[in-house]
Amino acid sequence: MATLFRFAGVFFVIYTQEHPPAHVHVKSHQKRPDWEIRIYLGRREDGGEDNYGRSFGDVSIRAGNPKMSKIDEYVDYLAEHINEAWALWESINP
């Protein structure tokens, strides 16, 4: 697992040996999270729909009950750092 960044007390991570479609995990704690979501990256070029039908900002809840009011904040933060997210994704998943 590679931590992309920490923002507002949550962790943005990409797991090694991850599967497509490209996405970032956002979770409340690195070891024992109360909740975890995936934020999909979409197409590298423009964030549009990828081959898996996911666009940038699509979210799936993996575990727990995250505050829905915060999810948009996490997506917005990731949008500001999209190039960093793609660089890490591509370094882990060539």
Image: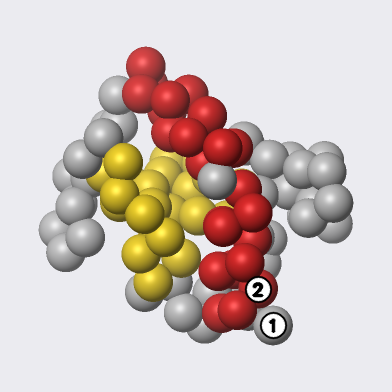
Q: Secondary structure at mark 2?
A: helix
Quadrant of the rendered structure where residue 21 is? bottom right
Mark 2 crowdedness (10 Å alpha carbons): few <14, some 14-19, many ≥20:
few
Q: Give the colouring mode of the picture.
A: secondary structure
Residue marked by disc 1:
94
Q: Number of numbered discs present?
A: 2
Horizontally, is 45 left or right of 60 in the view?
A: right
Q: Residue at x 36, y 54 (%)?
A: 5
Relative to residue 55, is residue 89 depicted above or below?
A: below
Residue 83, label in figure: none
Q: Which residue corresponds to the image point at 16% horizontal and 64% vertical from the top-left?
A: 31
**Circles 2 and 1: CB atoms closer than 8 Å:** yes
- Please give the label number shown on residue 90: 2
Type of residue at label 1? Pro
Crowd class of label 1 (few under 14; some 14 to 19; many from 20; radius 10 Å):
few
* Nearer to the camera, 77 or 75: 77
Q: Position of residue 86 (x, y in %)?
A: 64, 61
Q: Is residue 7 above or below residue 76?
A: below
Q: Nearer the viewer, residue 62 or 91?
A: 91
Relative height, residue 66 to residue 62 (above, below): above
SS at mark 1 in the image: loop
Residue 21 lies, with reference to residue 49, above or below; the image says: below
Quadrant placement of the C terminus: bottom right
Instruction: Answer left or right for 12 relative to 31.
Output: right
Farthest residue toward the left? 32
